[in-house]
Amino acid sequence: MRSRLLPLLIVLLTGVLLALGIPLATSQARSEQQRVVVDRIDDTARFASLTQFAADSAAPGAAGRQRLATLGDELATYHDVYGIKAGVFQRDGEPLAVAPAGWEVPGGVGGEEFAEALAGRRSQGPAQVWPWALDRRLVVASPVIRDGDVIAVVVIDSPTGPLRSRILRGWLGIAAGEAAAMLLAVAAAFGLTRWVLRPVRVLDRATHAITTGSLTARVAAASGPPELRSLARSFNEMADHVEEVLEQQRAFVADASHQLRNPLAALLLRIDLLGLELPEDNEEFASVRAEGVRLARVLDGLLGLALAEGTPADLRVTDVAALARERVDAWRPVADRRGVTLRFEGASAATGWADPVGLSSALDAIVDNALKFTPGGGEVRVVLTPNGESVTIETADDGPGLAGDELDRIGDRFWRSGRHQNVSGSGLGLSIVAALLAAGGATITYAANEPHGLRVIVAVPRHAPEDAAPGAVSRELPPGAAGA
């Protein structure tokens, strides 16, 4: 979301800065040109006054020629100092005095500026000069009026190089200001997106935590826009309600399982007593007793699942290697009785962040499940490998394994492969394992083992998660709950 919101804000801010900067640059260019044009108009007015004085009928002959010579000197000095061409022309375009010598009216007597001056008006100035217009010049013309008639025209042809340089320098200043403003705007956009999206990121983390089983995750509705703070409060209310409903559901399952175990135990005892009066090979008696044992196993599994999902994990730094080796040693007598080789391989020491009791129960269920499906003469290997961010415990067996579509369903509650219905189990063992591992931040995945069998990979984090709550009390599963 940030990758979409931030470019949008930058584009909008860029548009605003351009909308302000372009008119400002245009105004600066017009202001510079207007200043130059005003200066040139003042110069033409001064030369027009000198021309009136030189052409005064009260000073004929040599005096008049002397005044025209003085006017020519003024124009020459003006050209030498400023590099600007200037001249006084009669109505027919003939020069009275020009500098440099031989310069003619730009555009001839039909030129716009000259014609406007002949009409008795000062020229209004040329069109706007831009920095890239290298061949442009400023031409300003003013009439010389005596007794109400235009007797001559003063024309000034100014180069635009200095004007274009000043405009360009002004634009560079504006561009620098725009760049600085853009940097500030981008920094503000980053800050704004962080402020706006911070509650969204917190909501995302809390949602992920709840999805992975941490129902106590909540959002602090203290930052961000009011709408997102309101959303955070609504999220917390929803999470409270979901947690309450699930807690009621778990409590009901646990209570029901616990309450049914005593009557079921009594029923099984009476069935055994009844069996004493029946022949040993009575099929109906064997079927009834097997169903009763299966029901007891299901109730134990339901109680174990309710405890696994509802009990907070006691997270701490744990020697995962030592714990895994201990559980393998504990199950080796069972493997020997079944004629299965049980081996442990891997690092001698590797620490992780886990609940020792929960991880032990999960490993018991995984190893029990592997031994249950491995035929005599087969092998179960438990391999521990420390990685950068986790410690993996891989349990591989030589059993019949599962098909590709069955691997997607493994771990579902009460699901068992149709090919393994003859093996005892309730279908809850791996669901309990997933709940135990999720409470500690660990993960479990399944894959086919080559050439046949199943691989179960448990990944234990090496560092404490952000929402870890060490010190919480954990309980062991009831007997039989670990069986898959």
Image: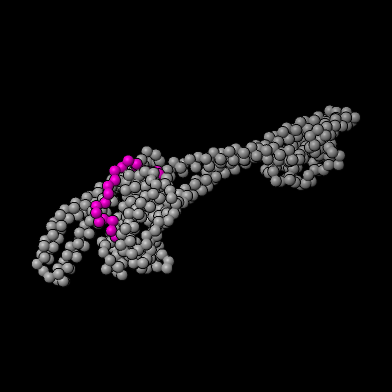
Instruction: Determine if the magenta segment contains residue 408.
Output: no
How many numbered discs, if any?
Answer: 0
Residue 234 found in image quarter: top left
Residue 161 found in image quarter: top right
x 59%, y 40%: residue: 179
x 30%, y 68%: residue: 420
Residue 83: in sight, yes or no? yes
Depicted 451 relative to depicted 258: above or below: below
Residue 119: in sight, yes or no? no
x and y percentages locating residue 108 in the rendered image: 79, 46
Q: Which residues are magenta?
A: 464-484
Q: Nearer the viewer, residue 215 or 130?
A: 215
Depicted 203 relative to depicted 434: above or below: above
> Overall secondary structure of the magenta stretch?
loop
Check the image and name the residue furthest to the left.
277
Instruction: Determine if the magenta segment contains residue 470.
Output: yes
x 76%, y 40%: residue: 159
Image colouring = one colour
Residue 32 found in image quarter: top right
Q: Nearer the viewer, residue 275 or 475?
A: 275
Quarter of the image with the C terminus in it: bottom left
x 17%, y 68%: residue: 286
x and y percentages locating residue 198 in the rendered image: 42, 43
x and y percentages locating residue 96 in the rendered image: 84, 37
x and y percentages locating residue 351 in the rendered image: 42, 46
Q: Nearer the viewer, residue 297 or 122?
A: 297
Check the image and name the residue furthest to the right.
62
